[in-house]
Amino acid sequence: MEESNLIYRAYSIMKEIGREEEWTVEYEKKLRFHLEEINLKYSYPRPRVIAARKAIMHVASELIDSGTVDGRRIQQAFTSHDYAVQLFNIIAKPEFIQTLKERDFGGVGNDWLERISDSSRITESLLDYNDGFKIVAEYTKVRNLDWGAPTEKYMYQIAGGEHMDEEENYIFGSAFHQLSDDYHSLKSGGHFIVVIRDHRYNQFDLKTKWIAINPILCRHLDWEPELSKLFAWKNSQGKLMAESIYWSNGNIGMTPREDGEVGEGWFVVVSKDGLKQIKSVEKNLFFQKKLTRSTYKNSLVSSISVFKNEKI
């Protein structure tokens, strides 16, 4: 079957189930203004995206019903929500997370982007967490609510090799579009110690893009799932080896200008014994970091990134 036929069929269904006047940039601006006026300052799916997704699912159902496509092979691609996320435990912003504010009255300096290399985070070593644990990975987003919404995204991880692809969005391995409940049985992730769950779900916050120890590595080390914590593992004696922790501070979707900062993020902790076991199978560990700063001006985004990759 020609791809063009599928596209035309999906578009025809879009026009049946949706309203074309809602698919314009002008309408989306009006919708955004309306939501902000009633203080619903959260991310939302665009009306045209909703109509397109419904149309594509309709076409997929027709192909399955006709026997043209095996529904089991495409079922995961059409999973649109990970309901486990809403049950994740949340902690307050940890002390080691950076604050962007530079001025007494809020905001950052005019040359803040250019001074990205001055960030103390890019020079940090492995951080301690509680008693007997090390933070081996982190994915953090912090936003200052001054004009221009100065924002930092920070990632770091321990890696079993020197290679780091600076063209990719993430420095971690990938567990793409996998449900959280399937984490412990995942068989993908590549040769990475830490993986990130990127996805196509109708969920937009960083809470849905968790990072965790690669379950393939954990099973190789004979660790067992620890279901009382997030993406956690224990050894055969029941001692906690690793877990992921999510933190949140305010509504990351808020728009300027307000006096304050918001943020959210994930970090992965591993016990000292667990880190020794990882080192026993990964002889050459590297400490990899990516820091990105961005600001808005006249609806345009300016951003700059720096990387650091050093042997532990």
Image: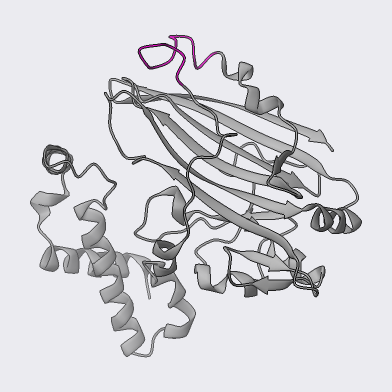
The answer to which image quadrant residue 38 occupies is top left
On the rendered image, what quadrant is the N terminus found in? Answer: bottom left
Q: Residue at coordinates 11% horizontally, 68% vertically from top-left? A: 16
Name the image colouring. one colour
Residue at the image position 23 percent from the left and 41 percent from the top: 41
The verdict on residue 200 being magenta is: no
Horizontal arrangement in the rendering, residue 224 relative to residue 199 (left or right): right
The C terminus: image quadrant: top right
**Image spot of residue 209 (x, y percent):** 49, 53
Q: Main secondary structure of the magenta part?
A: loop
The total of numbered circles placed on residues is: 0
Whether residue 76 is visible here, answered yes or no, is yes
Q: Position of residue 273 (x, y in %)?
A: 83, 57
Q: Quadrant of residue 240?
A: bottom right
Q: Nearer the viewer, residue 65 or 145?
A: 145
Q: Is residue 54 above or below residue 116?
A: below
At a point 31% along the width and 20% down the height, the residue shown is 147
Left or right relative to 280: residue 304: left
In the picture, residue 117 is in which quadrant?
Answer: top right
Viewer-side residue, 305 vs 274: 274
Confirm whether residue 171 shows in the render.
no
Residue 298 point in image, percent of width and height? 28, 20
Left or right, residue 152 beside residue 147? right
* Relative horizontal placement of residue 33, taking residue 275 as reference (left or right): left
The magenta segment is 101-114
The relative height of residue 97 versus residue 106 in the rendered view (above or below) is: below
Query: Which residue is farthest front?
Result: 131
Q: Is residue 112 magenta?
A: yes
Q: Which residue occupies the foreground of this view, 68 or 81? A: 81
